[in-house]
Image (tube, rainbow, N blue to C red):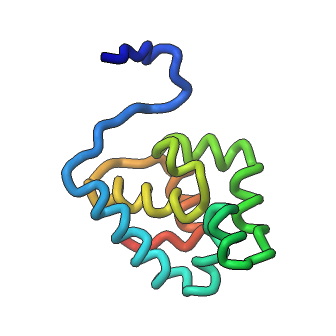
């Protein structure tokens, strides 16, 4: 058994709640609808954008390189910091579960066209 010293971690560990993965994936579907397919695809992880042949990584790079945006995304989860797509999907899942999120999380969620809940 591996023991983890939680006081040394820089991120939250949370158990996956029932439905969390489904809500996350629903968030992707709803996000594509609210943002539009073209804008949605531009918010992927750098490797995904490379694989799709997308050269314009402005939205994702701006998200990844902005310390404030990363701090805000980190309020949701470590995974939410990987791209605007994952931030929106993770936030959507939290909102569907009834979790309260900060005003700054909601502002960033809206900036990336997070779907209404």
- When asked about the image quadrant of residue 49, the answer is bottom right
Q: Residue furthest left?
A: 18
Relative horizontal placement of residue 99, taking residue 31 as reference (left or right): left
Q: Is residue 51 above or below residue 3?
A: below
At x 36%, y 67%, the residue is 25
Expressed as whole percent of the image width and height from the top left, the position of residue 65 reads 76, 50
The answer to whether residue 31 is above or below residue 107 is: below
Q: Is residue 38 rendered to the left or right of residue 75?
A: right
Number of disc labels: 0
Q: Residue at x 37, y 14 (%)?
A: 3
In the image, 109 versus 87, the foreground residue is 87
Q: Quadrant of the C terminus?
A: bottom left
Q: Position of residue 58 (x, y in %)?
A: 78, 68
Residue placed at 29% from the left, 44% from the top? 16
- At horizontal 47% and vertical 43% (from top left) the residue drawn is 77
Question: Is the N terminus in the top left, top right, bottom left or bottom right quadrant?
Answer: top left
Residue situated in front as seen by the camera: 68 or 37:
37
State which quadrant residue 96 falls in: bottom left
Is residue 27 left or right of 72 when viewed as pictured?
left
Position of residue 92 measured from the top left corner of the image (x, y, whole percent): 39, 62
x, y (%) of residue 34?
Answer: 48, 81
Up-down: is 90 above or below 71? below
């Amino acid at each position: 058994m591996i023991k983890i010293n939680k006081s040394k971690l820089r991120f939250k560990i949370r158990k996956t709640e029932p439905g969390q993965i489904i809500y996350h994936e629903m968030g992707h579907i709803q996000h594509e609808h609210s943002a539009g397919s073209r804008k949605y695809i531009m918010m992927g992880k750098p490797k995904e954008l490379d694989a799709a042949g997308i050269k314009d990584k402005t939205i994702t790079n701006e998200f990844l390189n902005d310390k404030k945006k990363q701090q805000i995304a980190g309020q949701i989860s470590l995974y939410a910091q990987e791209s605007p797509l994952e931030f929106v999907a993770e936030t959507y899942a939290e909102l569907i579960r009834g979790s309260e999120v900060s005003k700054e999380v909601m502002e960033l969620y809206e900036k990336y066209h997070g779907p209404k809940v």
